[in-house]
Image (spheres, helix red, strand yellow):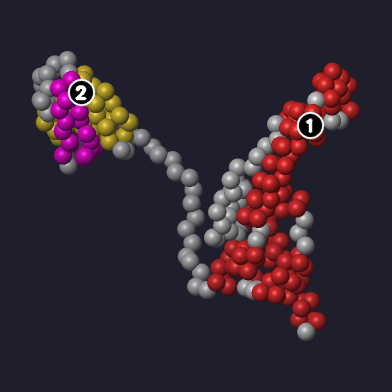
Amino acid sequence: MSGIIQSSADGLSIEGAHIVNISQNKMAISSELGNFNLEGEIGDTLIISNINYFTKKFIINTKSRISILLKPNVIQLEEVTVNNLPKTANDFRKKLIAMPMQDNNKFLPFGMKPAKPRSEIPPLYNRSLNSGVGYVITNPLKSITRKLSSEFEEKVKYYALKADEDNKIIRDKKFNRSLVSSLTGLEGNKLTDFIHFMDLTHSFLDSSSAYEIAERIEEEFKEFSQKTNISN
C-alpha cells in the first residue's frame, strides 16, 4: 500500500513521520514529500507519529492510495532569558545583585546547590498548633491525654529537633563563607569580621529567599566598607 502524510492545519507534506503497521509488525518513514510505502491489508491498524504532531491511529479500509492528516502539536515552553557571561568576577557580582526578584523563589546564587526538602512537623506534634487556649477548649480530652503521654512528648521533641537540624542545613546552604566571599571579594580575617558585622539572625535566614540574602549581603557590605575606610 502507499499513501501520503499531511498536516491538517495547512495541508503541507510531513517529512519523517513514522508509520507503523502494528498488525503485521512493519514500519515505514515518510519521505520529503510526505509519501510512504508499506506492507498492509484492509483491516490492519496503523500508528502514525511525528514529534511535531499528535499521534494518530488509522485503520486501512481501502486498497487505493491513502491520505492521512496529522494535527499539529503546539508545545508551549517556559520563558527563558539568555544573558552574556560577565567578563570579570566583579561584573558577575554586580549583575547578580541587580537581578530582579524571582517569583518562584527558586533562584540560587552561582555555585550553590538546591537545599533538600525541609522536614515538616506533623500538625499532631506541633506545639504551636495544639497548645493554644482555643485548642484546649475545643479538644479538652485530647489535650489532657497528650500532656500525660510520655511517648507523645518524645515525638514532639523528636520532630522539633529534626526540623531544627534541617533548618540549619538550609541556612548553611543559603548563607556561608564561600557565598559571602564570592559576593564581596573578602577573605580571611576581613571576611570573618564582615560576617560578624552583619550578624544575620536565624529567623531572617529561615524566612528569606537566597536572592534576598544576597541582596542583604550587598547592602551590608556597602556600610561595612564605609566604616572600614573611616576607621582606617
Secondary element at tag 2? loop
In this picture, which residue range is highlighted in magenta? 11-31
Q: Is residue 143 visible?
A: no
- Compute the Cα span from label 1 to label 2: 63 Å
Can you identify the residue that label 2 sits on?
Answer: 22
Name the residue: 55% across, 54% down. Answer: 113
Q: Main secondary structure of the magenta part?
A: loop
- 153 in the magenta segment: no
Return the disc, 1 or 2, that comes first in the chain's sequence: 2
Q: Are marks 1 and 2 in contact (CB under 8 Å)?
A: no
Q: Position of residue 225 (x, y in %)?
A: 73, 75
Residue 171 bears which disc, if any?
A: none
Can you identify the residue that label 1 sits on?
Answer: 153
Name the residue: 16% across, 39% down. Answer: 31
* 161 up-or-down from 188: above or below: above
* 128 up-or-down from 193: above or below: above
Q: Position of residue 189 (x, y in %)?
A: 70, 75
The residue mark sitting in front, 1 or 2, is 1
Q: Is residue 32 left or right of residue 221?
A: left
| Residue 77, picture quadrant | top left
Total label count?
2
Type of amino acid at the residue the image marks with label 2: Ile
Q: Pick whichever, 69 or 184, lies toward us.
A: 184
Q: Residues within 10 Å of mark 2 (few under 14, many from 20)?
A: few
| Residue 89, picture quadrant | bottom right
Q: Pick whichever, 13 or 84, lies toward us.
A: 84
Type of amino acid at the residue the image marks with label 1: Glu
Secondary element at tag 1? helix
Q: Position of residue 18 (x, y in %)?
A: 22, 34
Name the residue: 33% across, 31% down. Answer: 54
